[in-house]
Image (cartoon, rainbow, N blue to C red):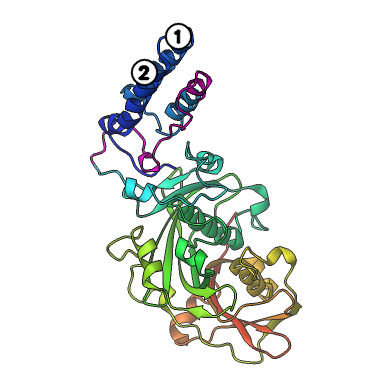
Amino acid sequence: MLLKVASSSSCNAVTSDHIQTLKQRRRLVGVSSTSIAIRRQFAAVCALSLSERSPILAGEPVLDHIQAFNKRCQLVGASSRPLSIRRRTAVVCGSSSSSPPSSEKASILTGEPNGWDHGFGRSWADRLRLGSLTEDGLSYKEKFIVRCYEVGINKTATVETIANLLQEVGCNHAQSVGFSTDGFATTHTMRKLHLIWVTARMHIEVYKYPAWSDVVEIETWCQSDGRIGTRRDWILKDYPTGEVIGRATSKWLMMNQDTRRLQKVSDDVREEYLIYCPKKLRLSFPEENNGSLKKISKLADPAQFSRVGMVPRRADLDMNQHVNNVTYMGWVLESMPQEIIDTHELQTITLDYKRECQHDDVVDSLTSPEPVEDTALSEPVEQDYRRFLHLLRLSGDGLEINRGRTEWRKKPGR
């Protein structure tokens, strides 16, 4: 797990303990012909660990040699206790960065199936995904290639694709600091108490949709949000140009997975994740009176447009056994009038999540244009820029599941 960049001198310090252990084993095996090969192996480990020519990860080349050295020691009767790199030392050597390594954060590992490989290195997922913590360790960046099945009728990524990528990078951020793989960013204390995070609000703004094969870089970070929840923010960029193509923010509450009741965030949980959060408030939407703060009015009944009788598919349920928050976005958009879909593209979506939807619920999606507060100001741009209010409710008793607002802009000319 790549957490921090350190100098080559730091790398020498990292491996010094292990070199001393190797020296002790060298004495144990004596000077037999077998030990000649072991001494060569020892020399290779030392050469790799002390080399200043090329950056190496204390977790891949060095560890490969150490594992081979362990096996050879066992063959000649040396101590069977395996030599392993301490998990605190997962740093990249060879950079001239003067920042202190975040080894304290690297030490928090979970032993998850997708986590560290028996103490000898990163998981395959960590090695192959194009993401890592930033230098200060307080945010996470990852690059994604937009795939053909992630684009829609406009030949660009859909908002559901964007939302899924946001969720993916948030979960990968949590994994990169040692949190769980069997729940969305659950800490050690949360898993013990059967607690999970659930979405309370999601706000996404897309200024330019990426197309098939475009490369997008997403940065994310989390912060405390009062006593009852936390918030996560994102910034999306076109990777080749660095242009900001979208921003998002969200609020999350803690729920007991067994009782399905909300709970306050305890001090123990707060302490576990706050060490990975920016010390100063950092917002993806720092502007005053930005759209992410705006209250969503309840849709007046009857609605002008509707799509009723929708039922969750099995594929809509996530690992927390409830309908995934991205599914609600698709349901909201199902009741949009077709003439708007044909001529406009979604710029902003804000959803407030009111209650869970179960696998056997039947859902109605309702949509109406948002009432205009100042007609004189809005008329000149009404055809190019449209706003709608949305409501998801249970078909049977009409209980509110979700309310939302969307803003649409005229599609760019092709």
- Observer able to see residue 221: yes
- Residue bearing mark 1: 32
- Up/down of 291 relative to 48, above or below: below
Kind of residue sitting beneath label 2: Arg
User: What number is the disc on residue 27?
Assistant: 2
Please provide percent x and percent y for residue 150. 64, 53
| Residue count near mark 2 (Cα–Cα under 10 Å), binned few <14, some 14–19, many ≥20 | few
Neighbour tally class for label 1: few under 14, some 14-19, many 20 plus, Cα within 10 Å: few
- The chief SS type of the magenta part is loop
Query: Looking at the image, which is closer to me, 188 or 48?
Result: 188
Q: Is residue 190 left or right of 399 when viewed as pictured? A: left
Q: Is residue 79 magenta?
A: yes
Q: Please report whichever mark, 2 or 1, sits nearer to the chain's N-terminal start.
A: 2
User: For the residues marked 2 and 1, what is the alpha-carbon distance in whole angstroms?
Assistant: 11 Å
* Image quadrant assignment for residue 54: top left
Q: Is 110 colored magenta in this rendering?
A: no
**Vertical placement of residue 117 versus 36, above or below:** below
Label 1 SS: loop
Q: Residue at x 68, y 58 (%)?
A: 153
Residue at the image point whose x is 32% and y is 26% from the top: 20
Residue 344 visible: no
Range drawn in magenta: 71-98
Q: Taking 127 as reference, is 377 above or below it?
A: below
